[in-house]
Amino acid sequence: MLLTFIVRRVLWTVPFLIAVSLVSFALIQAPPGDYLTSFAATLAASGDEVDQGRLEALRQRYGLDQPFLVQYWRWISGVLQGDFGISFEWQQPVSNLIWERMGLSVCLALGTLLFTWAVAFPVGIFSAVRKYSIGDYIATTFGFIGLATPNFLIALVLMYIGVVYFGADVSGLFSEEYQNAAWSWGKLLDLLAHLWIPVIILGTSSSASLIRIMRANLLDELHKPYVVTARAKGLSEFTLLMRYPVRLALNPFVSTIGWAFPQLISGAVITAFVLSLPTAGPLLLQALLAQDMYLAGAFILLLCSLTVIGMLVSDILLALIDPRVRYQ
Amino acid sequence: MPDTMQAAWSPGEAEAAPVVLEVQELAVDFPSRRGVFRAVDGVDLVLRAGRTLAVVGESGSGKSVTARAILQILDQPGRIAAGRVLLHRHHTTKGAAASGGAEEVVELSAMPARSAAIRAIRGRDIAMIFQEPMSSLSPVHTIGAQIIEAIRLHDRLGKRAARERAIDLLRQVEIPRPETAVDRYTFEFSGGMRQRAMIAMALACNPSVLIADEPTTALDVTTQAEILDLIRRLQASHGMAVMLITHDMGVVAEMADEVAVMRHGQVVERGGILDVFERPQHDYTRMLLGAVRALDRPSPRRLAMRATKPPGAPILRLDALRKVFPSARRMFRPAAPPVVAVDDVTLDLHAGETLGIVGESGSGKTTLGRCVMGLFQGLGGRIEYVGRDGSRIDLLGMRESALRPLRREIRMVFQDPFASLNPRMTVEQIVGEPMLVNGTHRGAALQRRVAELLDMVGLPDSAMERYPHAFSGGQRQRIGIARAIALEPRVIVADEPTSALDVSLRSQVLDLLLDLQERLGLSFLFISHDIGVIRYFCDRVAVMYRGKVVEIGETEAVCTAPQHAYTRALLSAVPHPDPRHRGMTGRHRYTEGA
């Protein structure tokens, strides 16, 4: 039953991925004009002569005069072979530009997710079980402050404190000597040493909201009859709590994994600017502004794919922890 | 199984059996901001090995709280304020073996609720089963996992041995194919099967005391009969003391050796089963018994009314009415077969008559009522309504606009008096809404009409400004009835209007309905699973089984001389409030084609 469920869900992602790629291509085509019109506009603005013949040649070279579906087909068949096209603005293959940034983004997102869970689970469980205790009030206060404060503001405050009082290097993800160095153990350690600051900044608000979700979910479950049954069996309170209500309270939790991931990546753009992180967000924004369509398209496609895969993962996890899901 | 029942029941020996559990002067408090509420107030109970003590009472009498206090599993913020709970372990088979016959009395009430000592008692010496088999088992663990957990908590057994024992327990509670059932989830089981699994779990460590808190209330009568039989047989083979908590005098008469009647947290009467049933001392016991017995025969009031005012010509005719719920379409799998909820039902409802529809859950009786209310699309057959002017109209062939005036004439009373009233509307708004929507009354006239309606259902004018939460279940049902009669309907579909009410309120609400029938000339389509209520209230009854009407006729004729085998099986399963007639009818389950 579980296996057929997983196979079905995996098969379903294929049409979804196709649809997602179509939509992302349509999205980057949606603004009027193309890269060359904005290129020409930039040239004109700086007073340069715009050579219509050259523009036309470029347009033909990149296939920009072809109908939508033909362009899409050329793009997507390239993507399947790992070729995301050429970035107009950077004049180099998109794949050279995105992988490292996407990798760092995913790294940051995973770190933030782990941090969020490590904080939100125990605190959420505690504040549900000890409802209206001092600890619950403290967690709740922290939660509301975390929810209400924009990430970039926390980033600025942390940066100020870090630089002024500790003289620490808080921006970026690497120290200067590793900035353009090849990957090594030293670089990895350097990354980890820098990573915790954005992880805390990005994780504050999401752990705050997860604490609230966990608390509310668990409060619903704590007084269900099956908890009384388990207590009447003679289970200790802690085992009982973990085995029954917490397990059921996880349900809504797991179903949010799907969108937690892309949200972390796209939501981190402002923070990434403030901290000058070499992640995907800033580059994506720049590419969108310049109508650098293949670069923007690659980012959007990867973000959408991450959403679809995140959903797949959360569906499978949900089926693992809740057998009722498998039978519907 | 009539023989085992008779064998297990011998009131004369009651004093001889050793006392296993004693509750002395127990008091339970629930502190709140507005002061302390004493839910249980000085209760004494004695449970003897191999005997059944029934604790009977209406909602709020403190019977469930007493049971939970014994195991110290009270809901927050409840706490034991006074009294003692004593477990005489040397009188239990397990305790006797462990202590070598030496006296060992454990005071459960002295143990902290979270202590290891009380946890060792829970599930091992005293096990408990609950009312809702649906929600009392975890939905995400297999039946087996939950039973094995209980076994391994108290007995040192390996995983494999525990699994074997779990399978054996499932076999004891007669779950078919226990080897595969052990790996199934609760939602794959019917209510009766879940309650069996629950019992298997309670028996996991051979407890000396079984506390059953309304174990059959959520089940159909035939399933109830099977579960009660099972509890009795397991009690005989394991020698358990059983504390059976129930509100149903029929179940008490069927099961108990001794009875304790509770009201407002106190035991008002206790004694042997025959004494309590035949020589009740307390007024409250007499009232409870009277209310149940009244429901076991026709209402004298209805018979008198029919003598002067016999039912008239048919007002509503169902002709081969059919409702099929199409199968859910599933991806990559064959579609499930469609469900025929109402299968070619043909019946007449006469003017001024009450027609009962009786059946178990899933028989299609509620769907039938909703078809008449026009709540479903895509029906087969005809629903013919005879208008005030004698014209015949097929409700199914009409457009929505033409149906509107007819909808005023067929109204509904719902089962759940708590869920069917909007908590954010005042009683005046609730009762007045249908008149406002249909534009029959407004302003001061509307207010006068609402007051008049409330008076008709026996509620004071002052109820108008209040919200539903200020009323008890019985009063809320009266509000629902006032709303139903607001537009002067001719037909009322009442779907289990009394099943959420305590027995003492049931006959009051039924009498109110009879009163309204006489004054307003109403016809009732009365849906119920309760034969007693049907017998009291209905002129004729239609018995439904799997969407079909298997038998229809005068209520008394159907109840005393049932024609169809299913009706006989259904009637045989109803427990009678008479301990001398327990199990006499020889109950059996009806299987189609048998």
Image (spheres, coloured by chain):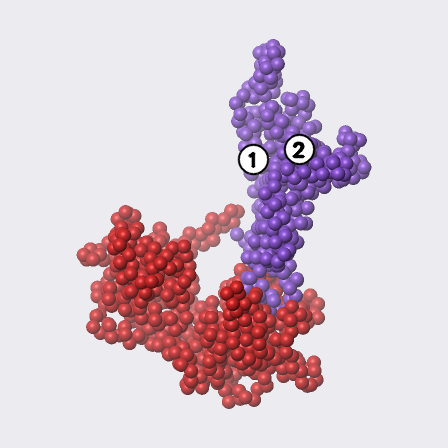
Chain colours: A purple, B red
Is B376 in front, or is A29?
A29
A256 or A71: nearer the eye?
A256
Is the residue A252 above or below the residue A104 in the image? below
Q: Residues within 10 Å of mark 1 (few under 14, many from 20)?
A: many
State which quarter of the image contains the C terminus of chain B.
bottom left
Which mark is first along the chain, 1 or 2?
1
Residues at discs 2 and 1 both on one chain? yes
Residue B171 in view in this figure: no
Residue at left 61%, top 20%? A62
Q: Amino acid at mark 1?
A: Val
Residue A251 appears at what percent x and percent y? 58, 52
The answer to whether marks 2 and 1 mark residues whose Cβ atoms lie closer than 8 Å is no
Amino acid type, residue under disc 2 in the picture: Val
Q: Which residue is mark 1?
A: A20
Q: Image quarter for residue B579?
A: bottom left
Residue located at (70% from left, 67% from top):
B158
Image location (x, y in percent) of residue B460: 32, 65
* Mark 2 belongs to chain: A
- Position of residue A32 relative to residue A266, above or below, is above
Mark 2 secondary-structure assignment = helix
Q: Is residue B122 left or right of residue B441?
A: right
Residue shown at the point (63%, 82%) measured from the top left: B88
- Taking the image as shown, residue A60 lies to the left or right of residue A182, namely left
Residue B16 placement (x, y as % from top left):
56, 89
Which of the labelled discs sits on residue A274, or is there none? Answer: 2
